[in-house]
Amino acid sequence: MLLEADVANELEDSLSALSELPTSTKEMGEYAQKLWTMLEEFAVTYGGKLIIAILLLIIGFKLVNYLTKKLVDSKAMSRLEPSARSFIKSLIRIVTKVLIGIIALSILGVPMTSIITVIGSCGLAVGLALQGSLANIAGGFVLLVVKPFKAGDFIIEGDVSGTVTEIGIFNTKVQTIDNKIIIIPNSTISNATVTNVTALDLRRVDLTFTASYSDDVKTVENTLLSVCDKHELILKDPAPFARISAHKDSALEYTLRAWCKTEDYWTVYFDLFRDVKYAFDEKGISIPFPQLDVHEKK
């Protein structure tokens, strides 16, 4: 049996012979015979290895998906946030599948030094071409380590506001209030000023109301506080705050501040507008329209 090097040389010679296309029927038969012989030699030398490499890729990829899912669903990983688990899952899959691909190439007889050289060259080229993507991966690591927010938090970043649904390898997905998905690159959001609205358990509702100059200041302030006292979602500690805060052209402005649980913020926000209007009507407190006094000289 010939050595693999000898067979490889023979295959190279056969390929050189096949480079000249036939010009007659007789040459066509000889050409087909040479082609068949070359395929037989290739199958004897590399056919088994090729089958093994293909089986390794198929079984290896399926095994990686299965083991990665088991790892992410394990008790040790369950302590991590969903966004961190998703990030780690994607990273492990990519790295292990690349390693399986390298092993498959080595089975086919590709020298490991050549593979490393090619990977190095490709890595440099890809790195230059995908600087933005690599920056996004680095940004993803920053988000997982620093944890400015997590999946489920409501954030505000520039003109984007919504609930974080996923922190991936390359980007972060945010679901807006009107049910749209906005995808933000990790490199952008990791370097931006982000407001995490739901990071803390309590939030303060700040509102302003106006009342006529003719209405008693103390009565207006007490009315605002009584509305807060009657609302079951407004906390007694810290206590609500209501004071006159500005003299406007047509009315006095009053600032009302009330504390509530973060998840109750919008309920309290809209309820206060409604309840204060009812309370002002009941107390006879007027909310004046903008007005201007004009004096005519005769």
Image (cartoon, helix red, strand yellow):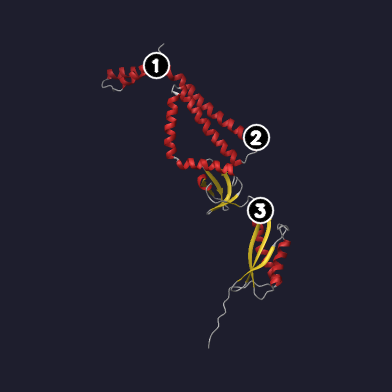
Query: Which residue is at 61% across, 35% downward?
Result: 72
* Kind of residue indicated by mark 2: Ala
- Identify the secondary structure beneath mark 3: helix
User: Crowding at label 3, few (<14), some or many (≥20) Cα neighbours within 10 Å?
Assistant: some
Q: Kindly identify the residue that appears in the image at 41 percent across and 13 percent down.
A: 3
The Cα–Cα distance between marks 3 and 1, rounded to whole angstroms, is 73 Å
Q: Earlier in the sequence, mark 2 or mark 3?
A: 2
Q: Sort mark 2 into few (<14), some (14-19) or many (20+) by Cα contacts within 10 Å.
A: few
Farthest bottom residue in view: 298
The correct choice, above or below, for 119 with respect to 189 in the image is above
CB of mark 1 within 8 Å of CB of mark 2? no
Residue indicated by mark 2 = 76
C-alpha span from label 2 to label 3 = 30 Å
Residue 227: image quadrant is bottom right
The answer to which image quadrant residue 142 occupies is top right
Query: Which disc is residue 5 wearing?
Result: 1
Toward the viewer: 247 or 261? Answer: 247
